[in-house]
Image: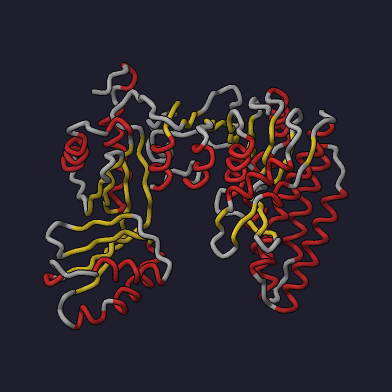
Amino acid sequence: MNNTMKILKFDGVIFHEIQLMRSVASIVTRSKPAVLVVSSLEETKKSLVRAMQNAEKGANYTHIVRTIHTHYKNVAQDLSVSQESLHQSIQVIDELLHGISLIKECSLRSYDYLIGFGERIATDLFFRFLKKMDNSMRYIDISSAIIVERHKKSVLFEKTYRAIRGMIKNRSHSVVVPGGLAVSTEGDSITLMEHGADYTATLLARALRAQAIEFWSNREMLFSADPQKVGDAFVIEKISVAEVMELSHFGAKIIHPRTLIPAAEKSISIYLRNIYSPMHKGTIIMNEEVVQPFLITGLASIQDVVLINITGDAMVGAVGISERVFSALKSVAVNIMMIIQSSSEHNISLVCCSHDEKKAIVSLRQFLHEEVKDKVIRKVSSQKGLEIIAVVGNNMKGSPGIAGRIFHVLGTNKINVVAIAQGAHEMNISFVVKKEDAICALHIIHKEFFQKRHVGNYN
């Protein structure tokens, strides 16, 4: 087994500029042998969805398909590669959309099959370009090895790992594979979740016991805070899987938490790299505690959330209230981001996305109708215009005074905290503020904990 093999995943942004493709070719040459996972342009996926929606309504979709075709035809011409497979894919897309337009409906199977063409077109062009420089380069449609239960979209891991090893036996040559695609247990094409190409990469790494995974995109690695909100944010050079999980959950647009699991199981390091700065080492995600130079590692935030309050003096000691609350929200597929309950038990507060507010309130009032009627619960209400801020770091464990510093600096700057939550692992302190206070809160907390970073003192 060749344990020097790497998994390299390339974001669809590489199809924007021919110079980026040439830069990628150099990266690939330096990384042999490797499995190269390719994602399509995000615009292509959105365009295919828009074309499908138009077809369902009986509206014109041909101009959308034509735009996709023209873009990739220009890419193929710039790369001097064959367009035969591209033309065939566009023809199938046209036929699929024509069928959808006739019945004015798109099934889930047809949707997955259609959207998958974005990845297939991109991967084929990428492979043909690399094949010109390295004739040993191979293309493998790995999607048939990633087996998923359709109704849950959950990967059958052991079957998938065996199938991947069966398809990639010769690991002395580099291989190009499409990202984000899988098959259901019934054999139908299926698209993976958000960040599906990233998930493909980590599944491959786990199955092949790769040396490392490199995610190449136009994003600037992982920062101590969103650089668009906090001008002093800096690149985090090393971070643990646990810290990334926390930051990802609370809005840091790095990598979906679920995609980390396969790599973490075998302690495979993940490198976040920038295509525009290929010599920069980027951020390393490691499955171990990382010694950080500061008390906190980073800040993350989630915009546009609401706080839902279930209040009643008779809730104290009442058995089953929490279970009914969570059942009500589960019944309408509302994701809960934070849970807050005082020890007096007369109030339960939950935070969810604002777009889920209406159905959450309706479902809670339906499920808790008897409790409201019997005066156990006084009211179910909500507060809008809020944002969650999470302060994350391994060094926070057992370190006294961190919460005090956070809330002291917020109070000094007259920022009111609406709700607070902290897990027993002590790696995360999360709180809710009004959205108009969020950017100021991020700035002052970042300054409070990172102001001495240039002298290397975190106390």
Quadrant for the C terminus, please: top left
Rendered location of residue 390, percent (x, y)? 32, 44
Q: Residue at x 31, y 79 (%)?
A: 366
Q: Residue at x 55, y 56 (%)?
A: 154
Q: Is residue 393 above or below residue 84?
A: above
Q: Nearer the viewer, residue 113 or 59?
A: 113
Q: Is residue 162 above or below residue 100?
A: above
Rendered location of residue 23, percent (x, y)? 69, 28
Rendered location of residue 77, percent (x, y)? 83, 41
Residue 77 left/right relative to 378: right
Residue 255 left/right relative to 124: left
Q: Residue at x 85, y 37 (%)?
A: 80
Rendered location of residue 18, percent (x, y)? 73, 35
Quadrant for the N terminus, please: top right
Q: Residue at x 71, y 32 (%)?
A: 19
Residue 106 left/right relative to 172: left
Judging from the image, the colouring scheme is secondary structure
Residue 175 left/right relative to 285: right
Q: Is residue 441 visible?
A: no
Q: Is residue 223 visible?
A: yes
Q: Nearer the viewer, residue 53 or 128?
A: 128
Q: Which quarter of the picture shows residue 104?
A: bottom right
State the count of labels: 0
- Which residue is most to the top? 455
Q: Nearer the viewer, residue 450 or 347?
A: 347
Q: Is residue 75 above or below residue 231?
A: below
